[in-house]
Image: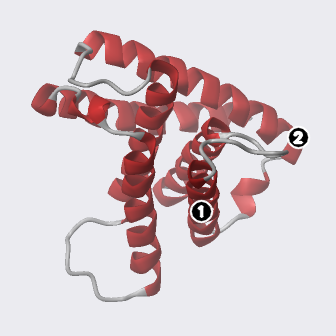
């Protein structure tokens, strides 16, 4: 489990580094995005990964790694939006966003550690394509919950689904970096 924690942190460091650099370029313009828009951005990334996994011809010179990083960062944005609400204008500094990013990562990593303990690191025997399918399934669930005005009868909420997508994407990146 120690390797998993270190590998997880290394993946998140890469994601966070890109996120902070994009904040320098664009600010936090994403703060105006509603959850369904963020969900759709994640969906586009996951669909592209699946397409890359199924098709041999690639017309854009970006592979699965950058798309999984995008999924992680968009999910963290979504979790921040759930926590802070949607803004009318960009309203956070890079330092404030970085703190919020780290807070969401800490919560999500703790969830991973708890589940990883109970599941015995089963993800290590999974294929990247299966992790992609799980992300797509979670996205379809989120879309359904969004269509139900965020309400569920017996299921986890939207935040838990975003957290699971982050963890699946981290696992996929650990596999791809191995």
Q: Is residue 153 visible?
A: yes
Image position of 83 with respect to 120: above or below:
above
Q: Which residue is mark 1?
A: 140
List x then y, in percent, for residue 36.
44, 49
Residue beneath the point at 44% across and 42% down: 35
Determine the residue located farthest toward the bottom in the rendered image. Answer: 56
Residue beneath the point at 21% across and 32% down: 29
Callout 2 secondary element: helix
Q: Is residue 59 left or right of residue 112?
A: left
Q: How many numbered marks appear?
A: 2
List x then y, in percent, for residue 177.
47, 54
Picture quarter containing residue 77? top left
Upstream in the sequence, badge 2 or badge 1? Answer: 2
Please tell me which residue lies in front, 20 or 38. Answer: 38
Picture quarter containing residue 7? top right
Q: Which residue is mark 2?
A: 118
């Amino acid at each position: 489990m120690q390797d998993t924690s270190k590998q997880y942190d290394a993946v998140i460091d890469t994601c966070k580094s890109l996120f902070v650099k994009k904040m320098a370029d664009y600010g936090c313009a994403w703060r105006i995005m509603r959850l369904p828009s963020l969900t759709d951005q994640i969906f586009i990334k996951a669909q592209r990964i699946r397409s890359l996994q199924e098709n041999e011809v690639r017309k854009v010179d970006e592979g699965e790694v950058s798309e999984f990083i995008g999924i992680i960062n968009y999910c963290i944005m979504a979790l921040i939006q759930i926590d802070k609400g949607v803004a009318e204008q960009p309203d956070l500094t890079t330092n404030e966003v970085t703190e919020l990013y780290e807070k969401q990562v800490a919560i999500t990593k703790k969830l991973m550690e708890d589940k990883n303990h109970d599941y015995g690191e089963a993800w290590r025997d999974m294929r990247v394509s299966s992790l992609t399918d799980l992300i797509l399934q979670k996205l379809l669930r989120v879309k359904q919950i969004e269509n139900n005005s965020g309400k569920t009868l017996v299921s986890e909420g939207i935040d838990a689904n975003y957290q699971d997508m982050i963890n699946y994407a981290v696992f996929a990146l650990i596999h791809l970096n191995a």
